Image (cartoon, grey):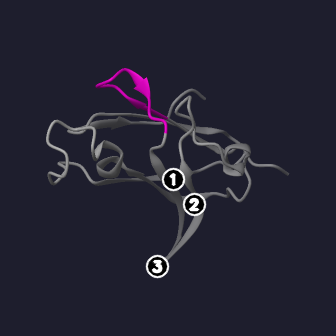
């Protein structure tokens, strides 16, 4: 059986553009053990393209999505090289039913973010 999957769509709302190149990691927590399931950049549309989107490796449990916001804005900010306000955003969430799809729309700026479970 293929699980529902976890998809991520990242948008830099300060520029109004998809967050192409934003580094993302998806981690599964098994007790004290953190297992990296997926890592890479968001594509041109802001979507994180990985087999986990179709459910590969997704089971019920606790996950962490990590977003390297500080690195994304490095060189884009008015003061390149300055210490970023946000560095790595870590979002802990649970998958209660692996047959359902979990969509995470990540809307962010260099100073804040919004992240929630999107369309069911």
Indicate the secondary structure of the residue bearing disc 2. Answer: strand
Badge 3 density bin: few <14, some 14–19, many ≥20, Cα 10 Å: few
Q: Residue at x 19, y 52 (%)?
A: 81
Q: Residue furthest right?
A: 1
List the residue tagged with mark 2: 61
Task: Decide whether residue 117 is among the magenta residues.
Answer: no
Q: Residue 92: percent from the left, percent from the top?
A: 42, 55
Q: Which mark is residue 24?
A: none
In this orientation, which residue lies closer to the viewer: 106 or 109?
109
Q: Start and end of the magenta stretch? A: 10-20
In this orientation, which residue lies closer to the viewer: 9 or 77?
77
- Rendered position, 33 above or below 86: below
List the residue tagged with mark 3: 32
Counting residues from the start of the chain, the first of labels 1 and 3 encountered is 3
Lateral position of residue 81 relative to residue 93, left or right: left
Q: Residue 64: percent from the left, percent from the top?
A: 46, 57
In whole angstroms, how far apart are the C-alphas of marks 2 and 1? Answer: 6 Å
List the residue tagged with mark 1: 94
| In contact (CB < 8 Å): disc 2 and disc 1 | yes
| In contact (CB < 8 Å): disc 3 and disc 2 | no
């Amino acid at each position: 059986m293929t699980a529902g999957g976890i998809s991520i769509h990242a948008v830099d709302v300060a520029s109004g553009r998809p967050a192409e190149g934003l580094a993302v990691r998806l981690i599964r927590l098994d007790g004290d053990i953190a297992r990296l399931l997926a890592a890479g950049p968001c594509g041109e549309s802001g979507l994180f393209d990985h087999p986990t989107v179709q459910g590969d490796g997704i089971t019920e449990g606790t996950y962490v999505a990590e977003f390297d916001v500080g690195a994304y804005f490095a060189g884009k900010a008015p003061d390149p090289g300055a210490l970023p306000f946000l560095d790595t955003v870590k979002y802990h969430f649970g998958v209660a039913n692996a047959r359902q799809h979990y969509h995470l729309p990540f809307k962010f700026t260099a100073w804040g973010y919004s992240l929630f479970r999107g369309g069911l």
